[in-house]
């Protein structure tokens, strides 16, 4: 009696798909073997597609047949054995050489003759035609889905496949923490390893329930799917799914990757004020080092030059930075009031944004026409595939940028408004970070608000960038008192005005202060004999000489003389904080 191998196969290795396929094949084949009185010596079960060669279990079965352990194969149909020309050719060759004497199928009859081998070849060809035709149908369906903006595969992390509508929707449990991870990496303060630690702490898993690896995290951060585009086989398409992040945030993430393309050496300690300050004598960069495990000193690198500048302690340097940044500081009350004014302006901007919206819509139409003409050129073989994909990607990115600007205008979020809010919040955070002595954040504010940082003779100087220089100039300048008037003690009152302090010629001057409540201090000096107070008179001159007249005037009144006099700005330099 001839010996047979039983071979059963399903096309996918997923355990939840085609579950009954293997069981039904084995049951039918055993019943068929019992009716035909066939001897099955071993069963081979495989879950892999036969479209391409390389099935391990199938190759193992052929090796055993080549050794002579069996003479035939029992399978459900010839397409279970082969759907490609190589595997089908092997079986035909084994039949020609006599290593396989018989093939048994419940749904197909095979005769070991020239005609039977010819019909078997046709059956293998039909199986290959079926899988090729199915592949073309699937590709055509995927292309149509991509044209409609639908993702043809499994949704990435943060999204779910909706079986009812066959679309991609947001994952209610994962998309919010994933959005925070994007924002953290875009800040430039977190590496991929730190993000993985956060992912493990919040137990964020991948699609299959496994932990997210480093490569998976990098692919997530670089995937355009999360801002609304779809990258499929090297070509980018517009997506109809809801985005998790904006295109601008994605651009910031890619810039962080570009900056980190050349990895730096590992640092045991991060010096916050290093990298943006230059020596005032030789122009070299200021570096830092830690001594005795606790003291941090900043000094010139003195690279290839002679420099006489000495070191400066980090606390002393931070004190100068805090003193300089206090010129642009805004308390919570003032910042809230300015932000409220911005919200009022926001409503006015919405009324005037209609013309800008129509302009952007016209630009979008032009880009869509360019994409259509580009597709026509590709179909007409006027341009090759690589040039088509490159130009299409640029046009799609331009279209996303215009769509984002259009959405911002429709939502009443003009670009200047976001920038103004960021400026106010930056100025407001100076006081909090100064109180907390958060040097890292203060260094970030320095890079954002200032330029041309120079350290010379232990003194730091720099210039404020626009528009922070406006806040500094509109701030308070120093002023002095007339000779003979000696203040007894200062009395403080919270308010919007502020006077700057210093000491000159042995006389006392008002001090610039931040109150415990986080507000500015308006200082009134009480004199022993008289009380002097500065009042700002709008629209009047501040100097009796016409050649030196200015539009500000200060009237000083005293209880004893009840007199009014105009004071030269050169003698009494006082400027109120007009911005507040």
Image: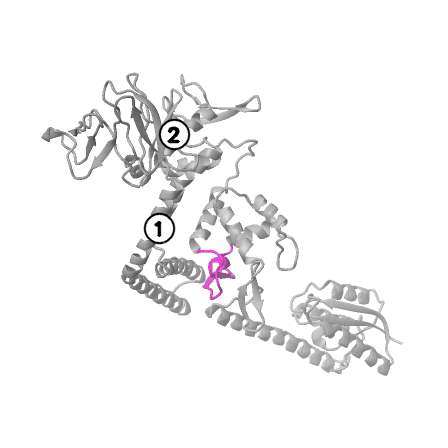
Up-down relation of residue 200 to residue 565 (above or below):
below
Would residue 434 appear left or right of 99 to someone viewing this image? Answer: left
Classify mark 1: helix, strand or loop.
helix
Residue that badge 2 annotates: 323
Q: Earlier in the sequence, mark 2 or mark 1?
A: 2
Up-down relation of residue 236 to residue 126 (above or below):
above
Q: Position of residue 330 (x, y in %)?
A: 37, 39
Whether residue 117 is visible to the viewer of this picture, yes or no, is yes
Q: Which residues are magenta?
A: 223-246
Crowdedness near tag 2: few (<14), some (14–19) or many (≥20) residues, C-alpha within 10 Å: few
Residue that badge 1 annotates: 340
Q: Position of residue 430 (x, y in %)?
A: 41, 37
Q: Are marks 2 and 1 in contact (CB under 8 Å)?
A: no
Crowdedness near tag 1: few (<14), some (14–19) or many (≥20) residues, C-alpha within 10 Å: few
Classify mark 2: helix, strand or loop.
helix
Determine the image quadrant of residue 37: bottom right
Quadrant placement of the N terminus? bottom right
Would residue 434 appear left or right of 139 to someone viewing this image? Answer: left
Is residue 239 inside the magenta stretch?
yes
Q: CA distance from mark 2 to mark 1?
A: 28 Å
Is residue 411 inside the magenta stretch?
no
Residue with the most extreme right position: 1
Q: Position of residue 566 (x, y in %)?
A: 16, 29
């Amino acid at each position: 009696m001839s010996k047979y191998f039983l071979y059963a196969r399903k096309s996918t290795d997923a355990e939840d798909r085609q579950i009954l396929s293997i069981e039904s094949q084995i049951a039918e084949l055993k019943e068929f073997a019992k009716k035909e009185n066939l001897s099955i010596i071993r069963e081979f079960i495989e879950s892999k597609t036969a479209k391409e060669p390389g099935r391990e279990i199938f190759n193992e079965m052929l090796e055993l047949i080549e050794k002579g352990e069996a003479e035939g194969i029992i399978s459900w149909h010839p397409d279970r054995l082969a759907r490609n020309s190589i595997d089908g050719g092997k079986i035909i060759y084994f039949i020609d050489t006599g290593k396989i004497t018989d093939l048994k199928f419940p749904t197909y009859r095979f005769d070991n003759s020239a005609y039977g081998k010819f019909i078997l070849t046709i059956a293998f060809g039909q199986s290959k035609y079926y899988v090729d035709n199915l592949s073309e149908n699937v590709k055509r369906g995927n292309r149509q889905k991509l044209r409609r903006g639908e993702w043809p595969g499994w949704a990435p992390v943060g999204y779910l496949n909706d079986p009812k509508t066959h679309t991609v929707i947001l994952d209610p449990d994962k998309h919010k923490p994933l959005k925070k991870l994007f924002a953290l990496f875009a800040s430039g303060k977190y590496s991929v390893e730190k993000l993985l630690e956060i992912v493990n702490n919040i137990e964020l898993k991948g699609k299959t329930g496994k932990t997210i690896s480093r490569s998976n995290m990098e692919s997530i951060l670089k995937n355009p799917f999360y801002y609304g585009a779809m990258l499929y086989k090297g070509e980018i398409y517009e997506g109809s799914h809801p985005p998790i992040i904006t295109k601008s945030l994605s651009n910031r993430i890619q810039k962080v990757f570009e900056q980190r393309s050349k990895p730096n050496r590992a640092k045991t300690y991060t010096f916050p004020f290093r990298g943006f300050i230059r020596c005032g004598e030789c122009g070299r960069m200021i570096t830092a080092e830690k001594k005795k495990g606790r003291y941090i000193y900043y000094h010139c690198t003195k690279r290839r030059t002679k420099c006489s500048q000495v070191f400066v302690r980090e606390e002393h340097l931070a004190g100068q930075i805090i003193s300089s940044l206090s010129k642009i500081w805004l308390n919570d009350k003032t910042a809230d009031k300015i932000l409220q004014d911005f919200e009022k302006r926001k409503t006015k901007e919405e009324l005037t944004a209609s013309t800008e919206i129509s302009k952007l819509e016209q630009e979008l139409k032009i880009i869509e026409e360019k994409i259509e003409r580009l597709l026509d050129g590709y179909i007409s073989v006027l341009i090759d595939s690589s040039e088509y994909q490159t130009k299409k990607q640029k046009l799609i990115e331009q279209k996303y940028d215009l769509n984002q600007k259009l959405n911002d205008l429709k939502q009443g979020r003009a670009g200047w408004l976001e920038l103004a809010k960021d400026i106010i919040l930056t100025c407001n955070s100076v006081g909090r970070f100064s109180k907390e002595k958060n040097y890292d954040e203060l260094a970030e504010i320095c890079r954002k608000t200032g330029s041309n940082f120079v350290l010379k003779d232990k003194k730091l100087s720099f210039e404020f960038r626009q528009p922070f220089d406006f806040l500094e100039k509109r701030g308070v300048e120093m002023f002095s008192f007339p000779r003979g008037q000696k203040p007894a003690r200062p009395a403080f009152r919270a308010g919007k005005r502020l006077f700057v302090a210093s000491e000159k010629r042995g006389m006392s001057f008002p001090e610039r202060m931040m109150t415990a409540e986080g507000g500015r201090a308006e200082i009134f000096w009480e004199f022993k004999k008289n009380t002097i107070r500065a009042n700002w008179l709008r629209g009047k001159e501040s100097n009796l000489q016409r050649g030196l007249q200015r539009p500000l005037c200060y009237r000083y009144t005293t209880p004893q003389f009840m007199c009014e006099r105009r004071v030269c700005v050169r003698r009494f330099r006082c400027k109120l904080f007009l911005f507040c």
